[in-house]
Amino acid sequence: MMGNVTSLWRHPIKSHGREDVSSTTLIAGHTMPGDRVWAVAHEASKADNSEWSRCANFTRIAKVPQLMAMTSRLDDAAGIVTLEHPELGSLSIDPDQDAQTFLDWVKPLMPADRAQSTRIVKVPNRGMTDSKFPSVTLCNTASHRAVEQQIGTELSIHRWRGNIWLDGFEAWEEFEWIDRDIRIGEAILRPLERTGRCPATKSNPVTGVHDADTLAALDTFGHRDFSMCAEVIQGGLVEVGSKVELL
């Protein structure tokens, strides 16, 4: 069976904004370029700039739901990230240089009873994805529609914060792709694990307010997983509209 790419998304600062792109050039063994380049460590974090760290070390939407409403744009050449949020307005920063400016800007969203954000972390050549290996997240549009049908209302795909959205497959078919190679455009990826989901997906991407019980909906399918974490086996160009084929 063949499908196609319907959209491409990256998240320059982990849990702080999303950006659509028309194309990306994947690199073997790496995350999607521009995705989770930076992460925001909180005051209880043990993360530093030396190696990958678990998501619990970072400020994330599961603990700060209003972050879901943030969007972003990364100027790859200049290293400048422009963030927008309905309650905060916009901010353009170099995360490597302007961490305090960012922390002051985002502070009004931070709940008083949560560990506060204190610094921005960046690991060279390693996007800070949740998986222990550098991954690209593949999302199946049919599975998203299945969740919508279970809840009984339309949902934004941004709740899942995936990288590559695919259409043309059956709902939940992606769970059968583990350790199988899949060609997407010029690249070849190998899904290695399912993505377990947390309360972050309950947050509305426009308002940042919890308004849909996505986890309860997933429970009806016998799991709390959505999307696949895949390793890039062969790099290459991937575009919106690229063909997708299981090998």
Image: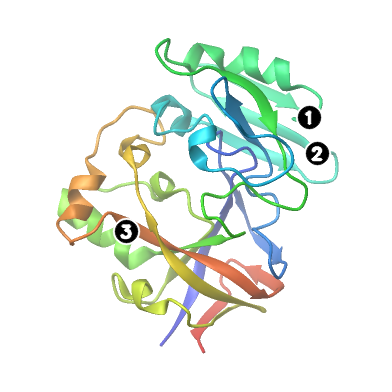
Q: Is residue 158 left or right of residue 234?
A: left
Return the residue at label 2: 79
Q: Secondary structure at mark 2?
A: loop
Q: Which of the two labelled residues, at mark 2 and mark 1, occupies the earlier sequence position?
A: 2
For the residue carrying disc 3, how many other residues have a C-alpha within 10 Å: few (<14), some (14-19), or many (20+)? many
Asked whether disc 2 touches disc 1, contact meaning CB atoms under 8 Å apart, the reply is: yes
Frontmost residue, 133 versus 226: 133
Q: Secondary structure at mark 3?
A: helix
Q: Is residue 153 visible?
A: no
Marks 2 and 3, how far apart in space? 33 Å
Is the image coloured rainbow, by chain, by secondary structure, or in one colour? Answer: rainbow
Q: Which residue is mark 3?
A: 144
Residue 42 lies left or right of residue 146; in this view the side is right
Q: Amino acid at mark 3?
A: His
Secondary structure under the numbered disc 1 in the rendered image: loop
Residue 236 lies, with reference to residue 17, above or below; the image says below
Q: Which mark is residue 94?
A: 1
